[in-house]
Amino acid sequence: MLSDVMEDYLKGIYDLQREGGAPVETSLIAGSLDVTAPTVTSMMEKLEERGLVAREKYEGVELTDEGETVAVEIIRHHRLLEAFLVDHLDYEWTEVHEEADVLEHHISEEFEERIAERLGDPTVDPHGDPIPEATLEPPTADETRPLGEFAVGDCVVVARVRDRDEDELEYLAEAGIVPGRRLVIEEKAPIGMLTVSHGDGQQNLPDEVAGTIRAQTVDVDTEEQSDARHVTEL
Amino acid sequence: MLSDVMEDYLKGIYDLQREGGAPVETSLIAGSLDVTAPTVTSMMEKLEERGLVAREKYEGVELTDEGETVAVEIIRHHRLLEAFLVDHLDYEWTEVHEEADVLEHHISEEFEERIAERLGDPTVDPHGDPIPEATLEPPTADETRPLGEFAVGDCVVVARVRDRDEDELEYLAEAGIVPGRRLVIEEKAPIGMLTVSHGDGQQNLPDEVAGTIRAQTVDVDTEEQSDARHVTEL
DNA sequence: TTTATGAATTAGACTCGTCTAAACTCTCAC
DNA sequence: GTGAGAGTTTAGACGAGTCTAATTCATAAA
């Protein structure tokens, strides 16, 4: 059995690998999990022994297939839980992350199956992030891009608003930046800020925030596929 | 903050104190949590330092008010979770204990409140055990007695079937021994066995099992108050 | 080619929860 | 009133996960 701490490392490595590719360096992991570098090194040794990561000293690590499967499973738990909390326990989509982050390590397979069934096997969580299938196939490449990568004048649909700080998410929700929302990129200011507009007005976003929001160019089919739950709330 | 291990000790001590009164001896705790006596001693020192138990060396411990409040809170979590799993996720009442035993340490106050609300603030869990109030007042004395304490000929209503081994509970459910069920004590055999009967026949119960089932003498009002969910299932 | 700098690893320590083995305390029977 | 036996505590160890301080490595600059 794996400790919940190990599961957190695996999940963290998975995310970093998705963003920046392998190998993932010690310091990146340390930053993302808020521990020191030596702590990461010793944990990587343990994960390597268990065959969950491949390690190259002084270079970094990469998840093995087995490690990736574990990470995907935890992510499935997380996102199903978020969807469940919103749909069945009246949580706001901005406040589910913390709860899911703890529970993801403690629910049984039974529980996972039952909430998935109860939710009708959803494919997307309340932040717009895709929910991995029960088979735990690693999800295929992703058609969305960070908001900051689009050009001025592009018309896009918000796909995901990365779950992190609750206040930040609430602010964005208030400003109408929610999954499913259609935006136009208005301006890219040289001070590290992006301006977008939608039906109800304009919004400035620091580059850091724009980097955590993913979108794709407008496409009516895709737009309807996406989970419109939050849009209807506003 | 308290570790989940500490919470388990507190819960264990609470139960033992309810059953056998204070002080609770080291060996009892060791038996109930399946650890060795020295482990218990060292944990009791820590709990004493934190003001959660009062300890008398070589005698045993007793929960302080603060320790009792923690225990009651965990028990509230456990029983609300059991009720939630049965009512909203189609679990059988015989299979909820394990899941609740883990999750009880990891749900937030928010989660607790929301499932309580969703369930309509129930007062009894699927095993018939009372759910402590949100105020965490220690529940008052209990009118039920273990089945073994009744006399031959008594007519009783099952109040609780202690949650423990899943197979055992399934067997009992199959045999019609479920909360809310009316039984007659037929015989107390000198080999440590009790015979009860109900509408559908007779059932023999080893004393050990009869000790974990609580009941009260028949009283129509009480009977209707009790949660009849499982009876209707059979 | 050599060196300086930044990142990674090793060394050693600490807490938590657990164990086994040894020492201690309490009580009850004689 | 003493000693035997049961139960409790002390002593010392270990693995997990973390830290700080010291060392080693890789690389980019001179």
Image: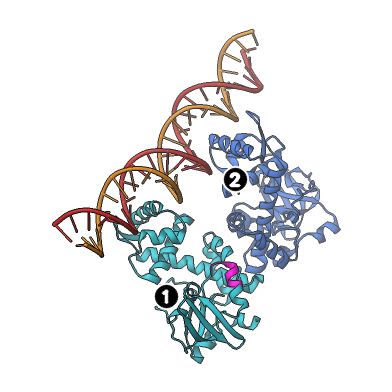
Chain colours: A blue, B cyan, C orange, D red
Q: Secondary structure at mark 2?
A: helix
Q: Does residue B162 belong to the magenta stretch?
A: no
Residue B154 locus on image (x, y percent): 47, 89
Quadrant assignment for the N terminus of chain B: bottom left
Residue D12 locus on image (x, y percent): 37, 38
Chain ID at mark 2 = A
Q: Secondary structure at mark 1?
A: loop
Chain ID at mark 1 = B
Quadrant of res A200: bottom right
Q: Is residue A3 left or right of residue A153?
A: left
Is there CB contact under 8 Å for labels 2 and 1?
no
Report the front residue among B126 and D20.
B126
Q: Is residue A197 visible?
A: yes
Q: Is residue B145 left or right of residue A183?
A: left
Q: Residue at x 66, y 71 (%)?
A: B90
Q: Which residue is mark 2?
A: A6
Residue A178 locus on image (x, y percent): 70, 58
Q: Amino acid at mark 2?
A: Met
